[in-house]
Amino acid sequence: MHHIRVASARRMALPLILIVAGSLAGCSVFKTSDEGSEANAETANVQATEGESAKGNGFAFSLQVRAPKDVREYLEKNLELQRFRDLPGLQERELSRLLGSADANARELLATLGYFSPDIRIELTPTPGAKAPRAVIVAVEEGERTTIQKVAIEFTGAIDDDPTSSRQAREIERDWSLPEGKPFTQKGWDGAKDEGLGVLRKKRFPTASIDKSRAEIDADTHKADLSVTYDSGPVYRFGSLKLNGVERYDEQGLRNIARLPQGDVYEESAMLDTQQRLASSGYFDSVFLTLDTISSDPSAATVTAQVKEAPLQKAVFGVGYSTDNGAGISLDHTHNSFPLIGWRALSKLSFDQKAQSIGTELTALPGENGWRWFTGGELKREETGSYQVNGTRFRLGRSQSTDHIDRNYSLQYDSAVSQGPMAPDDSSALSLNFGWTGRYFNDDSAPTRGWGIATEMGVGTTLRPERDLFTRLLVRGLYYQPLGVVTAPDGSRGHSRLQFRTEAGAVFAREGAQIPVTQLFLTGGDTTVRGYSLRAIGARTQDDTLFGGRYLGVASVEWQRPIVIKGEISDFESAVFIDAGAVADKASDLDPRVGVGAGVRWRSPVGPLQADLAYGIQAKALRLHLRLGFTF
């Protein structure tokens, strides 16, 4: 039950009371000023434009509304008289009948803005020689605006018996958008009730409803008393996940990808996260989740996923360019259920100016604990320092991905065959590797706040030219520190920030051990030390040959700030930065190479685009760096 009661009133027409008592469904969306009417009424005459006159031979009448700006604009947009202006054949008698109902229509509209005692004068004036033969003048003195005197919010249903839900009730009361002292509007009243309902439906109570609501308007005192009672309904908990539309793939494995928190209380965000995990898994073209609130037990409500499977196989051909590797082409092939084993196979062929590779990785669907098997191999030829390395890598292991944390361990074989003057000896190694990555960003694809840390550890032995034990460690970190607010002339706002990035690595082994080049460190390039080319910073240079090192250190600080364009916050940001990085065979020999510069960031539809111009202090040269997308 929803009521608005008008306790009246001077100049209050009966039709107004009857119409306002409903939802005013005939009204359009309108603009309203919460600061009240302007002291001096602004008037305007609405005339037919050239574009309108092109619709026919003329207008039956022109409409002139004389009222403060916010009221005038709203009436011009919503008065029913507007619908009859472009009827040149409208007769005098028919127009008089329309004017008879215009007063009630105007009062109905003004009531939605909180004006319940307006003075309205409607005049019909001949206008010979004008585009319309008559002018309808609606003069409005809106009177005092009605403000909220009292708000009463009550609850029924399971929320009364659930102490943990009291926070939701307090949130509705705290954030109520039509508090005492604020002007009453129908739009604000409807919006406040819906916002409170939304708070209930987002967590625990998806079937919550408005049991009754009432707005009592006193047109003499211009005060409104509001009351609403919410029926929370029962508390819902997640039950099982039902998949509709799955034909090719193992349903239990897909449920393990979805990770629906079965048994937990219902949360809209949790269901959206489940939907996103299925949608981004690569097995579906579309995913839509619904909670069964009709036939399910609220204590174990079924969630239904309506899915459309992606093609079994997909090939993607790409052409690109990077300032690190130059122009390149790639071919990716995906098989979502490889014959016999049912694992996903991702195969990639890539060629650019500095590296060429071919490889395949096979990945199983996860088990109930979230862990999945993977295996793969890669052949790669790339410039490492000043020589070419033909590398071979094979891996077998397991991995687990949760909302914020990735874990993996694997047995890995590496082989490196180097070519070129002064190239190191051929070598190979077998290692057991562990990895852990935590991501706590506000946005995984284009973050502006939060932090992330990644660690890798490998323990192994070289196989040739002789056997030596070694340990390899690598740690990476990224942190965003919010700074001040940037406010544009139009009132839009953005935040500037500092980005801190660091990377440290070490390989521990006896001094003469021949570690494969692929396990050593080089740095420099778009994502490490700008102002230097890819992997151009090494441990040492001998006869113009650059060698990888056992120790790595990289640090970067960058200031990012939104750019204001045409008076509003744009999708572009400016950046200034300083990077430093060093590689050495001994930690005491680390000698940083420094790059400084400035750049532009663009939040493009396909991900953040980064363009930087950096000067390498030791290299004594400018270098352009381009990068698309964010990965950590």
Image: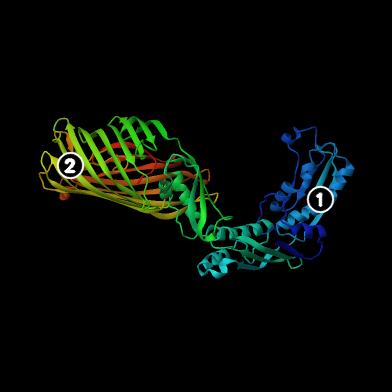
The answer to whether 61 is drawn above or below residue 67 in the figure is above
Q: Which residue in the protein does label 2 denote?
A: 429
Q: Position of residue 328 (x, y in %)?
A: 34, 30
The label on residue 427 is: none
Give amino acid for label 2. Answer: Ala
Q: Position of residue 10 (x, y in %)?
A: 81, 64
Residue 84 can be seen, yes or no: yes
The answer to whether 520 is drawn above or below residue 185 in the figure is above
Q: In the image shown, does 237 or 559 lie closer to the viewer?
A: 237
Quarter that holds the N terminus: bottom right
Q: Secondary structure at mark 1?
A: helix
Residue farthest to the right? Answer: 93
Q: In the image shown, does 576 or 9 lie closer to the viewer?
A: 9
Q: In the image shown, does 278 or 36 lie closer to the viewer?
A: 278
Judge left or right: residue 512 versus residue 270: left
How packed mark 2 is, by other alpha carbons closer than 10 Å (few <14, some 14-19, many 20 or more), is many
- Distance of label 2 from label 1 (alpha carbons): 89 Å
Q: Nearer the viewer, mark 2 or mark 1?
A: 2
* Sequence-earlier tag: 2 or 1: 1
Quadrant in which residue 532 is drawn: top left
Give amino acid for label 1. Answer: Ala
Q: Residue at x 36, y 35 (%)?
A: 339
How packed mark 1 is, by other alpha carbons closer than 10 Å (few <14, some 14-19, many 20 or more), is some
Q: Which residue in the protein does label 1 denote?
A: 102
